[in-house]
Image (cartoon, rainbow, N blue to C red):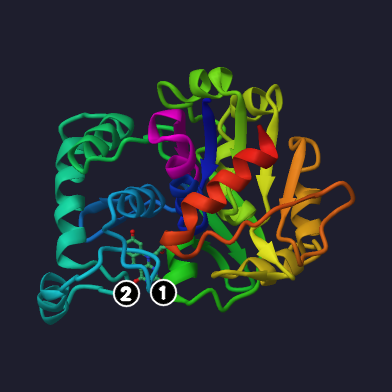
Amino acid sequence: VSIAILCGGLGGSRCVDALARAAGPEAITAIGNVGDDLEFLGLHISPDLDTVLYTLAGLLHEERGWGVRDETYNALALAKDLGAETWFTLGDRDIGLHLVRTAWLRNGLPLSEATRRLTEALGVGVRLLPVTDDRLRTKILTGEGELDFQEWFVARAHREAVTGVRYEGADEAVPAPGVLEAIDAAELVVVAPSNPFVSILPILAVPGVFAAVAAKRVAAISPLIGGKAFRGPLPEMLVSLGQDASSAGVAEMYSDLVDVFLVAPDDAGPPGAVTCDIDMVAPERREEVGRKLLEALL
Ligand code: FO1
């Protein structure tokens, strides 16, 4: 089989891991969001790509859902003593990865090639592609004005209600090498159980991606169970942006794209939803859930 997965942060990385364990990593191309990317203390950080990398390499800090496990924070502590802004928590090992990637990008490598080198060095068998090598940044509109995504999400702990979302640079962005080809070649495109506003729509906003996906058989996995997210502000965002805070509300957002919408057994989905075990939180359950997903979809 060959599966292309559109994915964001934690929910996306667990889904990529589950399907890679079930179908084999060589069957999977993960197309990752870059709208959450930021420059912090001079480093280029791609949180969503890194969460996929760390998850698949067995390095993720599972309790936090981001960053590296068994981490220390000495570099950031000194930066703080030196008067730097330190609201974005970067661990020492995580900084090691950001140093290497930032150096490659400064030397002119595209993000997709930097990502390919990182997957290879970390022994990750899945193909991970940033949706674009161009600059694309998610901006969050609130009553306080427009904020950079991480400024809203981390620095302000997503307190302000979201009145709009904008994907800066998306119109001029070009899909990274291999993205459209991987979608075209896939038997199935999976929309991971990620936040649609923050993770999936910025991927689909890159010209050419929506049309390529729409031409395929597409399955989306609900990021909500009983109206609740595993983590993150999706229910509040759905409400403040005028949708129902439920799997049906998310399905509605994907109605012109998705052929199969998967919901948890005890969840009320949209009409026609397919029920499947979609709980991919525990690493030791992922292979089994991945197999159930493949059975339901292929
Ligand atoms: N999330 C936080 O809530 N606080 C942090 O300090 C933080 C640091 C961080 C560092 C590296 C990284 O890859 C991710 C990090 N995240 C942090 C998570 C990140 O902000 C979000 O989870 C994703 O962007 C949402 O998909």
* Disc marking residue 279: none
> Which residue is the site of mark 1?
155
Residues shaded magenta: 19-33
Q: Is residue 21 magenta?
A: yes
Q: Quadrant of ligand 1?
A: bottom left
* Image side of residue 2 versus residue 154, left or right: right
Instruction: Tell me, yes or no, if residue 128 can be seen here.
Output: no
Element class at badge 1: helix
Element class at badge 2: loop
> Which residue is located at x 75 percent, y 46 percent?
261
Q: Position of residue 270 (x, y in %)?
A: 85, 54
Which residue type carries mark 1? Ala
> Which residue is the site of mark 2?
87
* Total numbered labels placed on residues in the image: 2
Q: In the rendered view, would you say 43 is above or below 238? A: above
* Contact (Cβ within 8 Å) of mark 1 with mark 2: yes
Q: Quadrant of residue 279?
A: bottom right
**CA distance separating discs 1 and 2:** 6 Å
Q: Nearer the viewer, residue 233 or 62?
A: 62
Q: Is residue 286 magenta?
A: no
